[in-house]
Image (tube, rainbow, N blue to C red):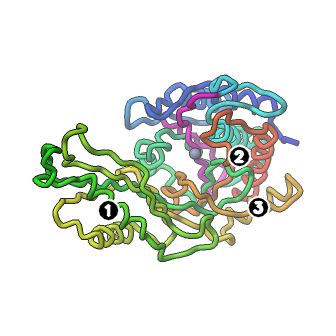
Amino acid sequence: MIRYIKESEISELTQALIKQPTVNPPGDTNQCAQIITDYFHKNGIEADILQCKNGIANVVAKYKGTQSGKTLLLNGHMDVVVPGEDWTVDPFGGEIRDGQIYGRGTCDMKSGIAAMMAAMVGFKRSKKKFNGEIILMAVGDEETGSQYGTRYLLEQKIGLQADFAIVTEPTDLKLELGNRGLRWIDLSITGKACHAGRPHVGINAIEHGARLIDAIRTFKPQIRNDKFEPPVPSLSVTQISGGSQANVIPNKCRITLDRRMLPGETTETVMSEISHIIKSAALSSVTIDIEMRPGFWDPYLISESEPIVQVLKNSCKKITGKNPLIGTKPACTDGSHLFHMGKIPTLLFGPGLPALSHQVDEHVPLQNIYLATDILIDAFEVLLR
Ligand SMILES: [Zn+2]
């Protein structure tokens, strides 16, 4: 049972967000940001659009209590990944069928944005007295690294003072206490081109790349954390390119690595480990340049004893009648940036189903969105006493 806000209002809000094709790239979130600010303005909540790059709009909405107190930050991203082919429904239609709402971003994560918006408005309509402040961030650029989204807002000192945060990424109403970290690293191998008829006078960059991949496959994780699934870090070769023509010995080969991290690992530990692997391959006749891509996420994990976890746990129990599952997220989220740049204990909790994120015919049960809204409203009352 939703308090203070009708189910139809929440489902219409979710549909309105899904109908905006905020596909990233290019990640244009202008129209979607406008819908969000309009909804807040209509409900008497202060909301502004902030941009640091053309096309990538971020919304910051604020709702203050009667006296000063704790600050709760809510965060969600408006951008979605490309829908791809083989959909049986319009990916931007917001169609509702058998209690499920369909569309790209229903799980990841427009249902999460709708739930936190509805919770903020429902909480206001309840007219309950509270202290402190709720700050809501609906951001762009999350699927491509958050440089112009969450990271930009934190650099502008927005939300940095928060005492706790909730990112409404898809968790299927589970409480997730952190996420794995990620670095993308490009290795560029330079050899010497020559006519393939006389290969001995050149240095084949692709063949050296193959030897390098063999060395990369000897990677042994040094740490383990059973709170994560899988419980160990990983190093995968995810892209390779090289060569210009069938009859030319290639002078270039580029290998991209996807390195998933666990708490305790840093840029320094990851980069020194890669240098070590490269050294072990002993490829002295080529040069190898190592470059880390600008988008990155650090691993993080908060304690289950944090107030944000305890309060949400109680609210889940109260609303759904059972204890929520507790875990962590294998994928990366803006929780990394809130935790590391803002030092904010950040919980991942949302209505979307993680298994359907980025999939064809992505959909979410409307009931999950209503429950998430209800749980958030209940948690606001306790967190902002
Ligand atoms: Zn997401």
Q: Is residue 76 magenta?
A: yes
Disc 3 under 8 Å from ligand 1? The reply is no
Identify the mark nearer the N-term, 1 or 2: 1
The amino acid pointed to by label 3 is Leu
What's the CA distance linking mark 1 and mark 2?
Answer: 38 Å
- In depth, the one of 167 and 224 nearer the eye is 224
Say which residue appears at 53% left-offset and 30% top-offset. 22
Displayed quadrant of residue 269: bottom left
Tag on residue 212? Answer: 1
Give the number of the mark in front: 3 or 1. 1
Residue position for label 2: 353
Horizontal side, residue 270 vs residue 75: left or right: left
Q: Which mark is residue 325?
A: 3
Q: Secondary structure at mark 1?
A: helix
Q: Is residue 258 left or right of residue 8?
A: left
In the rendered structure, are the residues bearing label 2 and label 3 in contact, judged by CB atoms less than 8 Å apart?
no
Query: Counting other residues with Cα less than 10 Å from the Cα at mark 2, is it few (<14), some (14-19), or many (20 or more)?
Result: many
The kind of residue on which mark 1 rests is Leu
Q: Is residue 102 above or below residue 174?
A: above
| N-terminal-most mark, 2 or 3 | 3
